[in-house]
Image (cartoon, grey):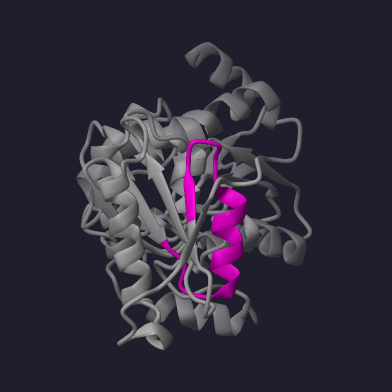
Amino acid sequence: MARELRKIFNKSLMKKARALVLLSGGLDSILAARLLLKQKIKVEALVFKSCFFGSEQAEITAKKFGINLKIADFSQRHFEIVKNPRFGYGKNMNPCIDCHILMLGFAKEIMVKEGFDFIATGEVLGERPMSQNRQSLELIEKQSGLKGYLLRPLSAKLLEPTIAEQKGIIDRNNLLAIRGRSRKEQLALAKKWKIDWFPAPSGGCLLTDFHFSEKLRDLIKNAVKPDMDDINLLKIGRHFWDNGVQIIIGRNYQENLKLREAGRKSDVLLEMKEPAGPTALVRGYKGKVSEKSIQKAKELIRSYAPKVRGKKIILFDAFLPDC
């Protein structure tokens, strides 16, 4: 592998330098790409999508900058590390170190195959306590097999020079030395460069959200082999568990429709005959749904249907999804 990487650099002396940028679409990755473009580096971008985050913001940025964007869906492999991360979780169910290593491993394969000179990310030294302290940045670089080939343009002057900098492929003097959790410098650059399409910080990954993380923990605990459909279902409605049976209550008309569409043949859907109220999807992961769980679902429907409060008798329809 080292020999292949050296070949890339020998070729780079005869052509315009190429960088593969991991582009989430957040402000830091946008600025990292912009810094490279200012140095006349040929930039292409790579964004990852899974059931926990999408590629929409990166697609907006790539279009704004006029750069090619590769989209990699690694949902299944990502979920495997979410269930059992080697380097642990952050504040919630976010295995940031393992996630970065996985992404950069993919990126390295593309770099070698397509002849990129180096990989760049928007990481900022000290911005995130778990994954962006100096020790973690070095660990991620080593574990992904990118020692010397991973550039962090926003904090480059605070880190060891990469091979690209040593060989003059990129000018270190025109890179930055941003450190810490304050975003003042990034926001000032965004204003200077008229970049106004970035999202709020930490808004992209559902694994950083406390409530979603709690629902995911319950799913992993109760379901034998949860799949991508099970995870996507966590984004809909209110979730409850009853002895290995999942009960999901729709919060509005749109969610009621989504629950109907998400149902499987083994699920039970419950609705009040009248008046209109929440739909409940009841899913058993350890066998057939019991009558006890169906009764529990009916009680939950009543509790979230203000129009039936005080009524002693309520009629329900129980039916199988249209699969």
- Image quarter hosting the C terminus: top right
Q: Is residue 216 visible?
A: no
**Residue 202 sits in quarter:** bottom left
| Residue 163 is covered by the magenta coloring | no
Q: Is residue 98 visible?
A: yes
In the displayed structure image, the side of residue 73 where residue 51 appears, left or right: left
Position of 186 relative to 282 (above/below): below
Position of 247 relative to 100 (above/below): below
Q: Which x, y percent locates residue 312?
A: 31, 79
**Residue 124 sits in quarter:** bottom left
Range of magenta residues: 249-269
Determine the residue positioned at 53% across, 70% down.
273
In the image shown, does 246 or 233 lie closer to the viewer?
246
In the image shown, does 205 or 125 lie closer to the viewer?
205
Position of 230 relative to 175 (above/below): above
In the displayed structure image, the side of residue 48 where residue 310 appears, left or right: left
| Residue 261 is covered by the magenta coloring | yes
In the displayed structure image, the side of residue 302 where residue 317 appears, left or right: right
**Residue 87 sits in quarter:** top left
In the image shown, does 28 or 156 lie closer to the viewer?
28
Q: Which x, y percent locates residue 173?
A: 48, 59
Position of 261 relative to 38 (above/below): above
Q: Which x, y percent locates residue 105?
A: 47, 29
Q: How many marks?
A: 0
Determine the residue positioned at 40% across, 25% down.
145
Q: Which x, y percent locates residue 123?
A: 40, 55
Determine the residue positioned at 23% across, 52% down.
90
Determine the residue positioned at 55% across, 78% down.
190
In the displayed structure image, the side of residue 31 where residue 52 appears, left or right: left
